[in-house]
Amino acid sequence: MTARRRLWLRLAGAAAGGVLLLTLAAVLTVSHYEESDPFCASCHTVPEVTYFDRAQQAKASMDAYADLSSAHYGADNGFRCIDCHRGNEGVFHRITALTLGARDTAIWLAGRADPAIEKTELVVPFLLTGACVKCHQESLLEVGFNNHFHNKLPDAFQAWVRGGMLTRPVDLPEAPLELMASDTTVLCVDCHRAHIHVEGSDRTSYMDLVNIVYPACVRCHQEVGHGPLELAAR
């Protein structure tokens, strides 16, 4: 190997090392600042600034909250945007969240952010569901038909396989402590949308029963091959 070739290899290695260090520094910097809701709201303008304002109102008021996200803030003043948007905090979810953040930054810089307040589509539903399961695993692991809309979800079975403890409902003390794998693709966020504002939804755990929950129920029934295929508000 010639001296010139060795020099180029050293320069390439130094450049790669520099890029790696800069990337690591950027990841650590972003990870630090994203713990703060005002930082998130400073770049995410519309509709995120609306969500931020709802959260602040929830902290300051005991009135009915505007949406599910705000209800989290009203119940726990230590709650932050990132608690949902980084998933279960595993490596794959962390990489996904950072990639999504880079995508959102590019959209913001290009001035192409979607200003719609009430989002109807989720970009990475599995990431949000990971955060749901992280905090609410016990809701998935209660056995019995009355909780089938939770314990029949794939995340419930996976949580049990990973060692989650099954519980019996109070009214069924002899219920078998077991779950069956389900073929449904329904996730937590298919029913529980964090930023959808529906008048009076504080009486339905901040869910839009007619437009979001019932269609998810029907989809699950279709996928597993049993259950009613028509649901309507009473």
Image (cartoon, rainbow, N blue to C red):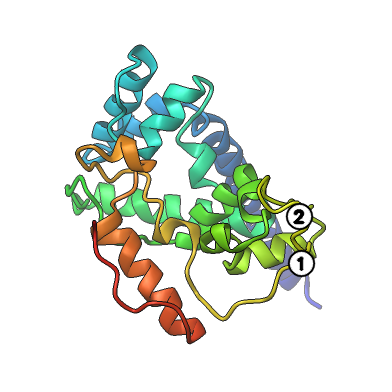
Image position of 70 (left or right of 179): left
Q: Which residue is mark 1?
A: 178
Is residue 89 in view? no
Amino acid type, residue under disc 2 in the picture: Leu
Circles 2 and 1, Cβ within 8 Å, touching? The answer is yes
Image position of 92 (left or right of 113): right
Q: Position of residue 216 (x, y in %)?
A: 37, 68
Is residue 51 in view? yes
Q: Residue at x 35, y 48 (%)?
A: 105
Q: Position of residue 192 (x, y in %)?
A: 41, 51
Q: Position of residue 21 (x, y in %)?
A: 65, 46
Q: Give the secondary structure at mark 2.
A: loop
Q: Give the secondary structure at mark 1.
A: loop
Q: Residue at x 69, y 54 (%)?
A: 172
Q: Position of residue 209 (x, y in %)?
A: 30, 55
Residue 166 got which mark?
Answer: 2
Image position of 111 (left or right of 35): left
Q: Is residue 21 above or below residue 130?
A: above
Figure quadrant of residue 136: top right
Label 2: how many residues lie within 10 Å, few (<14), some (14-19) or many (20+)? many
